[in-house]
Amino acid sequence: MSVAVKLIYNVALLFIMMIPGVLMKKCRLSTDSFGKGISNLVLYIAQPALTFVAYLRSYDGRILVNSLYVFIFSIILHGLFAVVAINFFKKAPDSMQRMLRFATVFSNVAFMGIPLIAAVLEADYPGSTVYALIYSITFNVFLWSLGVKFCTDGRDKNENDVNDYIEAKKKVFPWKAITHPTTIASLIGLIFFILPIEGYVPELAEEAFVMLKNLVAPLSMLVIGLRLPDMSFKGVLKDRDMYIFLVLRHIALPLLSLGLLKLVGLITPIDPAVEMVIVILAAAPAATSATMFAEKYDCDSVYVSRLVTISTLLSIITIPLILLLV
């Protein structure tokens, strides 16, 4: 089975995983706190386990060099994405404008990108999951700096909670990114990867980590499924800014990423796994964290939930098409 066919198959499989969440919500078998609890389980337990397990392999200098490439590219690309986003949506209402830019820059690395790469690429391209996790470190740094800036800068000084915004901005960066469990798991895993201590993790502990790792993909999609029934799509076809966002998030920015990779590839060879990982993550739908940031900083959470949902549904078509270009 080719990588493209495997990708289409696994994207479809991930979307099927959303169905239990939709059914649970429709049948009132879950509460709002249930979805939040599952999200926390994925972000703070299962994904760090996936991160650590990804590094439990024999040392390979190629993986280390490729990781450096991914790290550099991820910084450059997030910067370019931000420049593009800032130059669009200038006529949109303030709270919508903030979240349109946020959703344009930040893709769903945690809930869609990493599980997809682990399922599709890791077997044929060893190290792919490590590259995705390196990308996620940069993602978290930008999320808790630029993302907060999008949500808070220029807010009306007369707003009662402006002090809360200022205090929040002081607290989130850099500690939120540095102390995130996934980042810590990456640093610990990197030590195990580089140093000659392979086999020091007891087999029982490693199997436990693998079992937790396997929760990431199904639970991530379950959370998205839990949110779908609450979405309102009224007036969605008349939303010009939404169409611009979808073109940027699903076509323009992935193609920009691919173009940059090909351009650099003319100067120095780039591993195909690095290309595919970066393009998949760049082509992933809008980050589900956009909804949480909108709620935290009093932006339009209903609107951004609609963006995230439509973006997620559209990605089942666009991610395989973009990857075919690689």
Image (cartoon, rainbow, N blue to C red):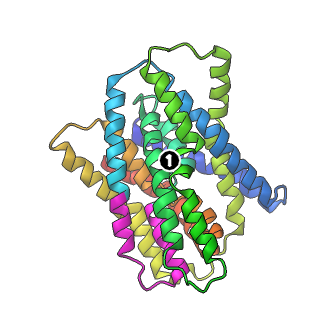
Mark 1: which amino acid? Answer: Gly
Q: Is residue 285 visible?
A: no
- Vertical arrangement, residue 80 with respect to residue 95, above or below: above
Q: Position of residue 81 (x, y in %)?
A: 37, 62
Q: Is residue 194 magenta?
A: no
**Residue located at (66% from left, 39% from top):** 45
Q: Which residues are magenta?
A: 79-105
Q: Main secondary structure of the magenta part?
A: helix
Q: Position of residue 293 (x, y in %)?
A: 60, 65
Would you say residue 91 sits in the magenta stretch?
yes
Q: Is residue 12 above or below residue 52?
A: below
Q: What residue sits 35% from the left and 29% below the top?
A: 64
Circle 1 packing at 10 Å, graded few (<14), some (14-19), many (20+), is many
x then y, percent, for residue 164: 64, 71
Residue drawn at the location 51% of the way across and 23% of the way down = 56
| Depth check, front residue: 99 or 148 | 148
**Element under label 1?**
helix
Count up the numbered dots: 1
- Residue, far left: 267
Quadrant of residue 230 in the image? Answer: bottom right
Q: Is residue 194 visible?
A: yes
Q: Nearer the viewer, residue 286 or 74?
A: 74
Q: The N terminus lies in which quarter of the figure?
A: top left
- Label 1, on which residue? 113
Measured as percent of width and height from the top left, residue 135 is found at 43, 45
